[in-house]
Amino acid sequence: MPDTAKKTRYFLDIEPELRNRVKAFAALKGKTMKDWLTEAIIAKLEDEIDASDGLASLADAEGTMSLEAYFESRQGESKQAE
């Protein structure tokens, strides 16, 4: 028996109209509904992870300066240019 990852089945109740749209779109892309949905879930998950990482980096104060300090540094630069 080949080594395969254990897979879990997930049953999803969706409206028939949505199912038909997904199935048709997947077919137009030459994919099965399962493959298309799997790719869509992975893409959504990656987007959510990227957004979470982005928000976390915004909260990281290391290497940043306050707005007041930024304005003061800009004023210093403009005086040196004069």
Image (cartoon, rainbow, N blue to C red):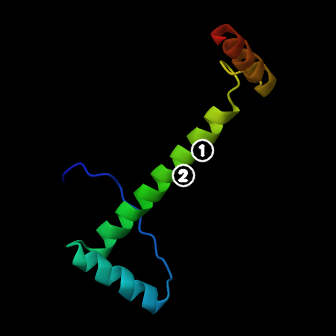
Label 1 CA crowd tier, 10 Å (few <14, some 14–19, many 20+)? few
From the viewer's side, name the closer residue of 3 and 66.
66
In the displayed structure, 41 sits above or below 21; it is above
Q: Which residue is mark 1?
A: 52
From the viewer's side, name the closer residue of 78 and 17.
78
> Residue 25, image x and y in percent?
31, 79
Distance Cα–Cα, label 2 vs label 1: 6 Å
Numbered mark located on residue 10 in the image: none
Residue depicted at 42% across the width and 56% down the height: 43
From the viewer's side, name the closer residue of 3 and 22.
22
Q: Residue furthest bottom?
A: 16
* Left or right position of 28 against 62: left
In the displayed structure, 49 sits above or below 59; it is below
Residue depicted at 48% across the width and 54% down the height: 45
Residue depicted at 45% across the width and 70% down the height: 10
Numbered mark located on residue 48 in the image: 2
Amino acid type at mark 2? Glu
Q: Secondary structure at mark 2?
A: helix
Amino acid type at mark 1? Ser
CB-based contact (under 8 Å), mark 2 and mark 1: yes
From the viewer's side, name the closer residue of 25 and 74.
74
